[in-house]
Amino acid sequence: MQLVHWKDFYVLEDRDLKGRGLFAAKNFAKGESLYVFDYWSEEIMPMHLTNHSCDPNGRFDDRGMLIALRDIEKGDEITFNYLLHPIPASPWNFECRCNSQNCIGWISVESSY
């Protein structure tokens, strides 16, 4: 399994009030591994800069690997659904600004899909 490095991503300030976001610096194919979530790492990881989406292009598997749910083109923002993360980092409580057609509007521990 080939793991990607920071060279495969870049960070941008988002104009839609979401803050910073992680963007693809290359194309990723559906099913390709994007990065692994290392729970014990003290370094900033790509996950720390990856925004939530109700229509994400990535999903964590049971090993903590973010996998592309569809083809991701260079320049696309990398997203995952915070409610489906295997190890929630905190009790989410924020207004969702993903702008997807199936947006649930508010992300919190009471939210469900």
Image (cartoon, grey):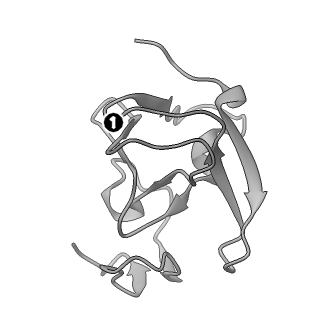
User: Residue at position x 47%, y 80% from top?
Assistant: 99
67 horizontally vs 13: left or right: left
Count of marks overlaid on the render: 1
Which one is nearer the viewer's eye here, 43 or 77?
Answer: 77
In the image, farthest residue toward the left: 113
User: Residue at position x 74%, y 50% from top?
Assistant: 11
Q: Mark 1 packing: few (<14 Cα in 10 Å), some, or many (20+)?
A: some
Q: Position of residue 20 (x, y in %)?
A: 72, 62
Q: Position of residue 31 (x, y in %)?
A: 31, 32
Which one is nearer the viewer's eye here, 27 or 87?
Answer: 27
From this view, report whether residue 88 is shown above or below residue 61: below
Q: Position of residue 68 (x, y in %)?
A: 38, 40
In the image, farthest residue toward the right: 13
Residue placed under numbered mark 1 in the picture: 30
21 horizontally vs 102: left or right: right
Which one is nearer the viewer's eye here, 95 or 22?
Answer: 22
